[in-house]
């Protein structure tokens, strides 16, 4: 049995220790906001936050997550970044957007007024196949105003 700290709650899950956290979030806990894109840490669709840092749950086993505070998009409510995303109508298909939003929340926690380079660095590996990058950048600018 694994004791996980997810969105401020303790969740107990019985799973093979090597199971990636993303599988546990989505299939066991019903937290489907973190998306499965590549499963190999490449696309950023699963981006969540651990201890304030952007984090890819497809790359970490459930066993390695004991005592770590995991924040998924389900644990974020009415955040300025979410409001900016809606105001800019960022999403097209929407699949990657929870990961983009979580990466942005982690970025702004570290850099409240990020430079273009900070944004590029933080979101470089969050892929959007609809190409919403200009709206994402505009939404980030709006969120910090
Ligand atoms: Fe985790 Fe692609 S599913 S980075």
Image (spheres, helix red, strand yellow):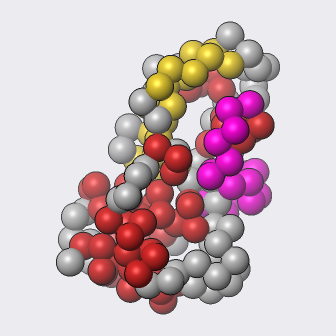
Left or right: residue 22 compared with residue 73 = right
Q: Nearer the viewer, residue 61 or 105?
A: 105
Left or right: residue 79 compared with residue 58 = left
Rendered position, 93 above or below 59: below
Name the residue rendered at 79%, 19% in the picture. 16
Q: Is residue 110 magenta?
A: no
User: Is residue 107 among what the camera can see?
Assistant: no
Name the residue rendered at 74%, 16% in the picture. 14
Residue 64 position, x and y percent, is: 59, 24
Residue 105 position, x and y percent, is: 38, 58
The residue positioned farthest toward the top in the image shown:
1
Residue 4 position, x and y percent, is: 55, 22
Q: Is residue 36 magenta?
A: yes
Rendered position, 66 above or below 111: above
User: Is residue 138 among what the camera can see?
Assistant: yes
Residue 113 position, x and y percent, is: 21, 71
Rendered position, 5 above or below 82: above
Point out the stretch of residues depicted in magenta: 28-44
């Amino acid at each position: 049995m694994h004791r996980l700290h997810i969105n401020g709650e303790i969740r107990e899950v019985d799973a093979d220790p090597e199971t990636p956290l993303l599988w546990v979030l989505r299939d066991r806990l019903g937290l489907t906001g973190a998306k499965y894109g590549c499963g190999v840490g490449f696309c950023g669709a699963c981006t969540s936050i651990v201890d304030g840092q952007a984090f890819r749950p497809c790359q970490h086993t459930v066993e390695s997550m004991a005592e770590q505070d995991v924040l998924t998009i389900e644990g974020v409510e009415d955040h300025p970044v979410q409001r900016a995303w809606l105001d800019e109508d960022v999403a097209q298909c929407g699949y990657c957007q929870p990961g983009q939003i979580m990466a942005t929340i982690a970025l702004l926690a570290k850099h409240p007024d990020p430079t273009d380079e900070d944004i590029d660095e933080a979101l470089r590996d969050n892929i959007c196949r609809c190409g919403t990058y200009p709206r994402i950048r505009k939404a980030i600018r709006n969120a910090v105003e």
